[in-house]
């Protein structure tokens, strides 16, 4: 009797895990075969498009730094200044349960094409890459959406 109860509990837990994974997959054609995502101006989902911010490259970097400091899943790793108008920031995001780490490269570019130089502005582009695995089950796009949503709402 106890053996059947244990088996039933084990099956229920396994089923709950499978359902949880299935519910997280956004794009069945992509999420099982790719472990990298990048912001794209032509993306259908607004959260996967580059973000345009007012201010300077340094202002945008400070916004990102403050956000990562208040979000325990995200860590600021490094930054690489390439002149006054370009900055690359390396971030990581760790998943809560399995502790998988994804690398996020954020590129800040000042005064994008077509923008008047009298009003400072920055374009934020980013790439998210899983360190392990062939597919990311949609985590890398979710990382980028989390980042762009935070930047748009700050």
Image: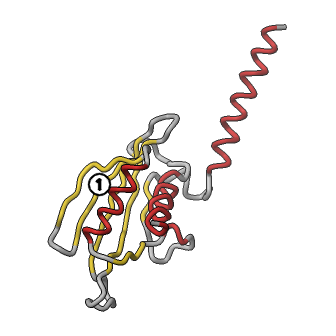
Q: Residue furthest left?
A: 83
Residue 147 figure quarter: bottom left
List x then y, in percent, for residue 56. 27, 75
Query: Image check: 78 left or right of 95?
Result: left
| Residue shown at the point (76%, 17%) measured from the top left | 7
| Residue shown at the point (28%, 59%) measured from the top left | 89
* Image color mode: secondary structure
List x then y, in percent, for residue 46. 54, 72
Q: In the picture shown, does residue 18 fall above or below 11?
A: below
Query: Which residue is labeled 1 in the image?
Result: 90
- From the viewer's side, name the closer residue of 29 and 76: 76
Q: Quadrant of the C terminus?
A: bottom left
Identify the secondary structure beneath mark 1. Answer: strand
Query: Image check: 88 left or right of 94?
Result: left
- From the viewer's side, name the closer residue of 95 and 44: 95
Q: In the picture shown, does residue 110 fall above or below 48?
A: below
Query: Image check: 116 left or right of 85?
Result: right
- From the viewer's side, name the closer residue of 99 and 121: 121
């Amino acid at each position: 009797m106890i053996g059947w109860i244990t088996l039933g509990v084990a099956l229920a837990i396994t089923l709950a895990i499978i359902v949880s994974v299935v519910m997280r997959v956004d794009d069945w054609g992509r999420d099982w075969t790719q472990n990298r995502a990048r912001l794209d101006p032509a993306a259908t989902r607004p959260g996967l498009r580059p973000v345009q911010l007012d201010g300077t490259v340094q202002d945008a970097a400070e916004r990102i730094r403050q956000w990562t400091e208040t979000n325990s899943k995200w860590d600021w790793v490094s930054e690489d200044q390439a002149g006054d108008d370009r900055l690359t920031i390396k971030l990581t995001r760790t998943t809560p349960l399995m502790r998988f780490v994804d690398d996020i490269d954020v590129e800040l570019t000042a005064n994008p094409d077509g923008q008047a130089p009298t009003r400072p502005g920055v374009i934020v582009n980013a790439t998210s890459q899983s360190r392990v695995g062939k597919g990311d089950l949609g985590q890398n796009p979710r990382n980028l959406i989390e980042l762009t949503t935070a930047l748009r709402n700050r």
